[in-house]
């Protein structure tokens, strides 16, 4: 307060000052804002970069990333035949991973055309197998086709049997005349048509059963759901000598623990499409043995180090049993032959005796 207790009053601006004030204030405000934003650059209402250097660095990094991506896609498109499998040293997790696993994981998926060409090549090689490679060996693969019997055609009966060796050479491929009336040929799945079973070349069930048993006896039998095939043939086979691809654990993992289909396994493991139309038991048997060959080392190791010796002992025992059976049969046959010869000798003696009696009678008669 001023002396004498009077309140101080602000000086009232003149009319000229009032007119000048609006022109000065905006300029000062704009200059102040400009000073505050020297270290702040606005790119958009929702994004701010703290300074020009950071903005430039971000733009540069973004440009380099885009150019690398474009270059990589161009390289992939122009060099599809080059291997994309990384070196094990580049992968921190690959110390205990084998080369085959890396190859399977990092190999690009084949196109439909590539699958057709590879399948054609494999089948051509199998068809060309000859000589010793086409003979019966330690391993055989089997597949059967069924037809429907019974009122609704829901029951299955054997209609075709195909067996191939380790190299895919066909050892047996025959159509089988069912013992019951066929009510559903299942042609769209089995490929079986009426003329196949009505031809003179079709075997009876017993003939097919006998030929199959003769081939698979004492062999390692490979198949997909092979117990169904054996059941249709009314045959048994030692579990020690069976390799069922539908029950192999690593294959079941591909189907999340369920029973995998042969078509799915061949597609996932071999990268080849089969059964695109009706089934062929020859084709199924061939690619079943291919599946087995792709995992043979690991599969056989899973039985333990002594599995090979166990199989050898088992086969040796079986061969001894067969030799004994053959010996018994030969003895039985020889006994029959000997008995027949004795009967013939007795008949000859009887005839000679009757002949001498006739002579004596004639002599008596002549006298």
Image (tube, rainbow, N blue to C red):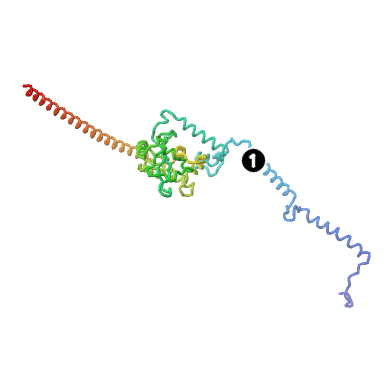
Q: Position of residue 244 (x, y in %)?
A: 42, 43
Q: Residue furthest left?
A: 367
Picture quadrant where residue 328 is located: top left
Secondary structure beneath dot 1 equals: helix
Picture quadrant where residue 184 is located: top left
Left or right of residue 54: residue 265: left
Q: Which quadrant of the rendered structure holds the N terminus?
A: bottom right
Q: How many marks?
A: 1
Q: Position of residue 325 (x, y in %)?
A: 27, 36
Q: Position of residue 185 (x, y in %)?
A: 45, 43
Q: Residue furthest bottom?
A: 5
Q: Which residue is mark 1?
A: 73
Closest to the observer: 363 or 341? 363
Q: Residue at x 43, y 46 (%)?
A: 183
Left or right of residue 126: residue 25: right
Q: Residue at x 85, y 59 (%)?
A: 28
Q: Is residue 198 above or below residue 56?
A: above
Q: Position of residue 85 (x, y in %)?
A: 56, 39
Examine the rendering and report whether any part of residue 217 can be seen: no
Picture quadrant where residue 302 is located: top left
Closest to the observer: 52 or 261? 261
Q: Is residue 277 above or below residue 38?
A: above
Closest to the observer: 281 or 32? 281
Examine the rendering and report whether any part of residue 166 can be seen: yes
Q: Which quadrant of the rendered structure holds the C terminus?
A: top left
């Amino acid at each position: 307060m001023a002396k004498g207790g009077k309140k101080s009053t602000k000086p009232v601006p003149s009319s000229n000052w009032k007119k000048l004030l609006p022109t000065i204030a905006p300029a000062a405000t704009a200059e102040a804002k400009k000073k505050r934003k020297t270290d702040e650059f606005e790119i958009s209402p929702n994004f701010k970069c703290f300074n020009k250097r950071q903005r430039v660095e971000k733009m540069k990094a973004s440009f380099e990333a885009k150019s690398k991506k474009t270059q990589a896609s161009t390289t992939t498109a122009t060099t599809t035949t080059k291997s994309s499998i990384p070196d094990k040293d580049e992968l921190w997790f690959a110390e205990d991973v084998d080369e085959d696993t890396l190859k399977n994981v990092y190999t690009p998926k084949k196109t439909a055309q590539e699958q057709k060409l590879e399948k054609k090549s494999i089948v051509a090689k199998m068809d060309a197998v000859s000589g010793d490679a086409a003979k019966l060996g330690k391993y055989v693969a089997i597949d059967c086709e069924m037809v429907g019997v019974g009122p609704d055609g829901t029951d299955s009966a054997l209609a075709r049997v195909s067996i191939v060796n380790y190299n895919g050479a066909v050892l047996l491929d025959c159509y089988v005349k069912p013992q019951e009336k066929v009510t559903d040929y299942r042609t769209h799945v089995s490929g079986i048509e009426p003329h196949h079973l009505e031809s003179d070349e079709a075997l009876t069930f017993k003939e097919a059963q006998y030929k199959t048993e003769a081939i698979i006896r004492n062999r390692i039998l490979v198949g997909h759901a092979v117990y169904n095939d054996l059941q249709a043939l009314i045959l048994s086979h030692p579990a020690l000598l069976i390799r069922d691809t539908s029950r192999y654990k690593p294959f079941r993992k591909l189907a999340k623990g369920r029973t995998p289909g042969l078509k799915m396994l061949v597609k996932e493991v071999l990268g080849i499409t089969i059964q695109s139309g009706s089934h062929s038991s020859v084709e199924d048997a061939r690619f079943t043995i291919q599946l087995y060959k792709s995992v043979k080392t690991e599969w056989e190791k899973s039985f333990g180090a002594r599995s090979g010796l166990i199989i050898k002992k088992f086969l040796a025992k079986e061969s001894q049993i067969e030799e004994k059976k053959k010996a018994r049969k030969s003895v039985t046959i020889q006994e029959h032959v000997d008995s027949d010869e004795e009967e013939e000798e007795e008949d000859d003696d009887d005839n000679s005796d009757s002949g001498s009696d006739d002579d004596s009678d004639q002599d008596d008669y002549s006298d």
